[in-house]
Image: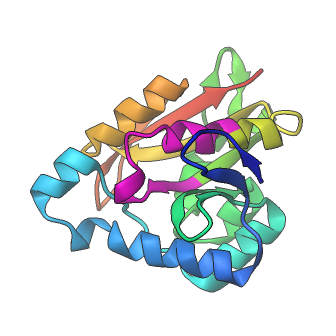
Amino acid sequence: MAELNAQRIAYGPAQGDAALEKILTLQAENLRGTLTPEHQSAQGFLTFRYDLPLLQRMNNALPHVVAATDTQLAGYALSTTPEICRENPLLRPLVERLDGLVFGGKPFAERRFYVMGQICVAEGFRGQGVFDGLYQTHQALYDTQFDCLVTEISLQNTRSLAAHRRVGFEVIDEVQDAADRWAVVMWNWA
């Protein structure tokens, strides 16, 4: 892992089940249903609950990125392939939606893309550049394999939408499902 700042936070691929268990712990602390509406509005929230077998499968195909000190997980950014998304009911709707999109005159199905499954920064590390560091590490690891990175964000999660725009994501679509209204966002590297 490369150290990127004076906080001694190292960024790199998630390695082993211990790292994935730490991701699950941080995820549980930030799920929408566990936070007050005030906290959700001020700090953002996570929508999906992943389990260890799915995280393992995703990580084996395309390693997740973590930010950590010597003793604590500062944040994570889950990555996955469109193929794994198609096999999972939680992730399938996004890639099925992308199959029908045209962006920049090119059908999305012809693009080399991968999916950000979720990004989270631990509360004590927010506002210190960890979010940007996670995405910079993603780009450094994967920009030779992929043209872009795609994810979807609840339109109610204004903090996350603003942070993604700051990094360089742009909204390419919006979709409504039974649970929420979502912005489909893309970070174009091509």
* Left or right of residue 62, residue 165 in this image: left
* Residue 112 is at least partly visible in this image: no
Q: Is residue 83 above or below residue 167?
A: below
Q: Is residue 123 above or below residue 188?
A: below
Q: Nearer the viewer, residue 99 or 166?
A: 166
Residue 2 lies, in percent from the top left, at 76, 47
Residue shown at 23% from the left, 73% from the top: 34
Quarter location, residue 81: bottom right
Q: Residue furthest top?
A: 105
Residue shown at 12% from the left, 58% from the top: 37
Q: Quadrant of the C terminus?
A: top right
Quarter location, residue 187: top right
Residue 38 lies, in percent from the top left, at 11, 54
Q: Nearer the viewer, residue 25 or 171?
A: 25
* Residue 96 is at least partly visible in this image: yes
Residue 163 lies, in percent from the top left, at 41, 33
Q: Is residue 161 above or below residue 24?
A: above
Q: How many marks?
A: 0
Q: Quadrant of the N terminus?
A: bottom right
Residue shown at 81% from the left, 43% from the top: 141
Q: Is 154 one of the magenta-colored residues? A: no
* Magenta highlight range: 117-136
Protein image colouring = rainbow
Q: Nearer the viewer, residue 181 or 114?
A: 114
Quarter location, residue 22: bottom right
Residue 181 lies, in percent from the top left, at 30, 46
Q: Nearer the viewer, residue 120 or 6?
A: 6
Residue shown at 55% from the left, 51% from the top: 94
